[in-house]
Image (cartoon, rainbow, N blue to C red):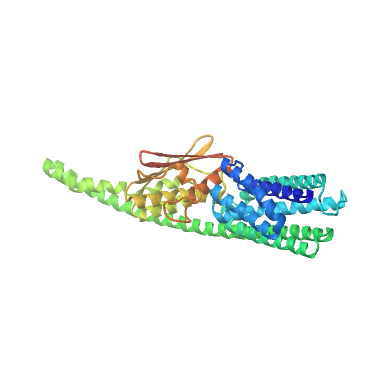
Amino acid sequence: METSELVTITLIVLQMIFCYTVFKLLIGEAKFSKLELLLLLISAPLMGILFLYTNFIGTIVMILSMLMLGIFFVNIKKLYITGALSYSLIIMIISDHISGLADAYIWNNTGVMIKVWDTLLHTTVGMGLAIVITVMVARIEPVIEKKVPFLSEFYPIISIMGIFMMVIYYSSIFLGKYLGNNVEIITLNLVFFIFYFFISIIAFLMYASSTRNRYETQQKELEYLSNQRYMDAMESQFKEISKFRHDYKNILTSMENFIMDRDMDGLDEYYHSMLKTSSKVIEQNDYKLEKLGNIQDRALKSILASKLITTQEKGIDARIEVTEIISKVNMNVVSLVRLMGIFLDNAIEELEELGEGVLSVAVYQDEKAVHLIIQNSCREDIPKLYQLKTKGFSTKGTNRGNGLSNVQDIVTEAENIRLATTIEHQLFTQKLVIEF
């Protein structure tokens, strides 16, 4: 085998291993399993040999082999794996083209690279640039997630954009090779790649900003409707209390008659038939929303009112305790509503499945933080916590298992939020602490 062939195979091996490593970093998994690493080290030389003799087909097979490794060893949706792999390839393509221009304009190497040192220099520069770009992406991502708290909902679109971009990039590369790959074509391709990449990013950010504005408008509308339902419930409760006060006055008058006549048997019968039944009215769900009046934070109050009223309408026993005035919650409004919505929706669904049990909500604050506790009865055979928090896992069917994994993402992003989740004695408890 000639030197140029060995150089080509070595270059492909290094690029495949490095590209797959970048892919793992992009999805936040830096560790390799032993089997995964072994298969990568075995398949990389095979892809290098295949590329040497088939070029285009070898490239396709190499991409597919990395995709299969990702699908087999990474526990996320196939679309997200394909998207992340596409972006790792895009990073490698842009880095390789910049390195190619450095070869031509800085080191004056315009020919086909067959020298070991030329190849080593080209590869080192390309991979170094890829590392820089990957680190930049990793640092920019949290900033974007803060501005777009529901970024995870855009992952399908982001993945499809990456796949489409990768196809365009490789089409341009193979077209350039067909036309005779020279410095001018490499330069033109690089300018096109960067321009197309930034145009795609700008278009996505504009779309995300528009979606966020629309989402916040919808949240305000839902908040208004929730507050309206809360006010209606309070009005109904006030009427019931007024009615009960009138009835209670009549009850006391009746009791007075039994006592005056010393009719103990009649009083006993009257107590069991009327008083004991009437006392249960105080414990009805309709009288439990008044505690929400202590919450002055509009977002928190509206989501709690909406979900608790929904709980009552479903005939589920719901209890809320707010012992003091909660004026402000130091948390992004959208994230707060999403978290509480996920917690309460999961609790309601579990209680509906169970057919019995209680939903309890407690809100209090101390000098350092606001504490939110949501507790609900649950089944004995409820899955383990690590399963419930796994992205994609669900007990309710396919494409529904992202609730608690999204919660983990939101909590991880915020520095002032702590969450403790426990399952004990058929009680599922979420304790959220939001520091001031």
Residue 293: where, in percent of width, then height?
44, 47
Screen quadrant of the C terminus: top right
Residue 201: where, in percent of width, then height?
68, 57
**Residue 131 at least partly seen:** yes
Q: Is residue 254 left or right of residue 399?
A: left
Q: Residue at x 82, y 54 (%)?
A: 112
Work out which residue is located at the far front of the displayed protein and give it. 1
Work out which residue is located at the far top of the displayed protein and give it. 367
In this view of the protein, which residue sits in the foreground, 74 or 403?
Answer: 74
In this view of the protein, which residue sits in the foreground, 195 or 180?
Answer: 180
Work out which residue is located at the far right of the displayed protein and give it. 108
In this view of the protein, which residue sits in the foreground, 240 or 298?
Answer: 298
Residue 39: where, in percent of width, then height?
60, 46
Q: Quadrant of residue 323?
A: top left
Q: Give the total number of marks visible in the rendering.
A: 0
**Residue 150 at least partly seen:** no
In this view of the protein, which residue sits in the foreground, 400 or 268?
Answer: 400
Q: Is residue 329 left or right of residue 276?
A: right
Residue 231: where, in percent of width, then height?
43, 55
Q: Is residue 101 left or right of residue 301?
A: right
Q: Is residue 205 left or right of residue 327?
A: right
